[in-house]
Amino acid sequence: MRHLTCTFIFGTLLSASSVIIAQQPPSIVHAQLSTASASNGLEPQLERMKHTDAPTWVGYSIPVAEDFHSGSQSDHIAYLEGDHAGDSYNTIDKENTPFDHAVVLLRIASGHIENIRLENPDRQLDAGGLHFLWLNGVAPTDSIHTLQTIALKDDSNHLRDTAIFAISLHQSPETIPALISLTSPNNDLALREKAAFWLTNRHGHEGFAAIQHLARTDTDPKFREKLCFDLTLSKDSGALNELIRMAHSDTSPQVRKQAQFWMANIGGKKVAGDLRDLAENDPDNAVRKSAVFALSRLPGNEAATQLIQVASSSKEPSIRKQAVFWLGQSNDPRALDYLTKLLAQ
């Protein structure tokens, strides 16, 4: 019992130590450095900085949902100001170590946030002589809310996209709901697409479930078309089945074509039968032809196998012609044999 008690106490101290370390500012040089507590909220601190005359960097630490690594580990110094493309970095020779937290950096000037950066916690920051405020105790929920506001209100694509990515990093129950809210039809398409991308890229089954719901209920075919690619990023076993469903059932021909293309790229032989069925039975001729093209994207010798079958058995002349065309682009010897015999007839 004493051993268990000691182990528990040691583990508790270790966890507390990790939290404290995560709150420590990184190494910061060439800065007018100050620290403050964000225990009363992140927004009040940011509003205070917006009323200062000179540009200011504000930094804080967040726990991340997956191991984080930003850029090349050899770039040990991150220059926050100026063009340092030609400078010699103080390089270090070590493996790309992932981190369980990341540093969020906000540049405030002329009364608003004009830049967001994300850095490794062990990277030295060069603030270029500016004021740098390090905030302790920033709650992940406050951070997400602030970044969400930036994503919704700012016209800069770079700032918006970085804010959405930063939201996706957070280890917080608020992360997925925040990303889902950004996919709302009330938002512009580019913002919706970026939020959907990071939902599938970083958030496992919950992210997939959110994208699946959007694929089945959203009324914008341009958005659903983009979701086809997002599904290829998901490691969830249901992603391929959802692409197959979209290829068969989506009301938009363009969405069905995109779903065909991406299911061929990730499904391989598993989707050959579905693509042949679509090439024969989809009500839209352009989609039928697209299914033949998707067959040509199957890996290995499967493409030639399926194209020969379509060229030999399709009831529709235009589909047979399309299959012959893509066989002509193939390097598979069987394709040449088939075409030679076809010409000899």
Image (tube, helix red, strand yellow):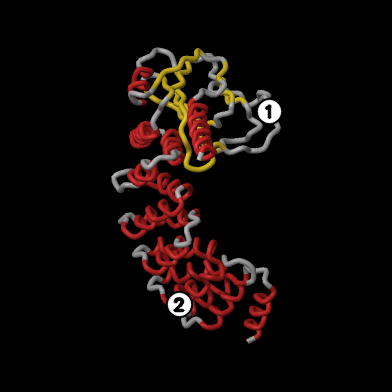
Residue 154 appearing in the image: no
Q: Which of 303 and 200 is in front in this view?
A: 200
Query: Measured from the top left, where is residue 8 in percent x and y?
Result: 50, 37
Callout 1 amino acid? Thr
Tell me the kind of residue under disc 2: Glu
Q: Where is residue 31 in the image (x, y as percent from the top left)?
A: 53, 15
Tell me how far mark 1 sits from mark 2, CA to CA.
Answer: 59 Å
Residue plotted at (40% across, 73% down): 282
The residue to which callout 2 is attached is 280
Q: Is mark 2 on a helix, strand or loop?
A: helix
Report the residue at 35% width, 55% height from top. Answer: 214
Q: Which mark is residue 91?
A: 1
Name the spot of residue 61 as percent of width and height, x first.
47, 29
* Mark 1, other Cα within 10 Å: few <14 / some 14–19 / many ≥20: few
Residue 323: quadrant of the picture: bottom right
Q: Position of residue 341 (x, y in %)?
A: 66, 83
Which residue ends up furthest to the bottom in the rendered image?
345
- The residue drawn where x is 50% and y is 81% is 314
Figure check: 165 above or below 25: below
Closer to us: 336 or 218: 218
Residue 252 shown left or right of residue 272 in the figure: left
Q: Crowding near pointer 2: few (<14 within 10 Å), some, many (20+)? A: many
Q: Is residue 200 above or below residue 54?
A: below
- Mark toward the start of the polypeptide (1 vs 2): 1
Q: Is residue 173 placed above or below 304 in the rendered structure? A: above
Q: Can the viewer see residue 332?
A: yes
Viewer-nearest residue: 93 or 247 = 93
For marks 1 and 2, give the one nearer the viewer: 1
